[in-house]
Image (cartoon, rainbow, N blue to C red):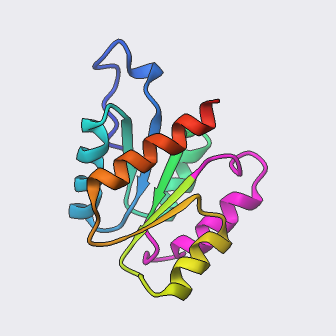
Amino acid sequence: MSTEHPESSPSLASQPRITIVEDDRDCRELLRMALEAEGFAVSDVSSALRLISTLYVDEPDLLVLDVIMSWIDGFELCRALKRNDRFKHIPIVIVTGKSEPEDVEAGFAAGATDYFTKPLNLRKFCQRVREILESEST
């Protein structure tokens, strides 16, 4: 289920598109609101399976992944996306409660562009997302 707002703004098409994959509704909503406040076009899904079903239709400019999800964890999803020629260019930012050094290492080894732990500093998170997107567009 996507919560992206359809053409409510004439500049929507030019906004960077971000998809959040997070099974916790409150966390998903918090991330979506913070990113929308920064001017991004945001959609969100509650599972990796829902992401896969929409990814070919609505390819985002950046993905935000949780790690602990049903069906497939965020590390494995990140690895799978990075192995796929169509999606390997999409930057992935992991946001998770898994904060052990080996977890962070696993995230980067899976292909994540950056890794944030909860509780999240939303200002730093949004600033880093913007930096990643700006570096991708140059």
Identify the residue at horizontal 28%, vertical 51% (top origin).
Answer: 123
Residue bounds of the magenta highlight: 66-91
Question: Residue 136 sits in which quadrant?
Answer: top right
- Comparing 16 with 130, the one in front is 130
Residue 88 in picture, x, y percent from top left:
71, 51
Q: Quadrant of the C terminus?
A: top right
Residue 17 in picture, x, y percent from top left:
46, 36
State how many labels appear.
0
Say whether residue 101 is visible: yes
- Comparing 123 with 66, the one in front is 123
Identify the residue at horizontal 37%, vertical 34% (top origin).
Answer: 40
- Comparing 132 with 14, the one in front is 132
Identify the residue at horizontal 27%, vertical 61% (top origin).
Answer: 121
Residue 111 in picture, x, y percent from top left:
66, 64
Specify the principal SS of the magenta part.
loop
Whether residue 83 appears in magenta in the rendering, the answer is yes
Please say if 16 is above or below 111. Answer: above
Question: Residue 42 sits in which quadrant?
Answer: top left
Please say if 110 is above or below 7. Answer: below
Whether residue 33 appears in magenta in the rendering, the answer is no
Say whether residue 57 is visible: no
- Furthest residue toward top: 10
Identify the residue at horizontal 44%, vertical 50% (top origin).
Answer: 128
| Residue 55 located left or right of residue 131 | right
Residue 64 in picture, x, y percent from top left:
45, 56
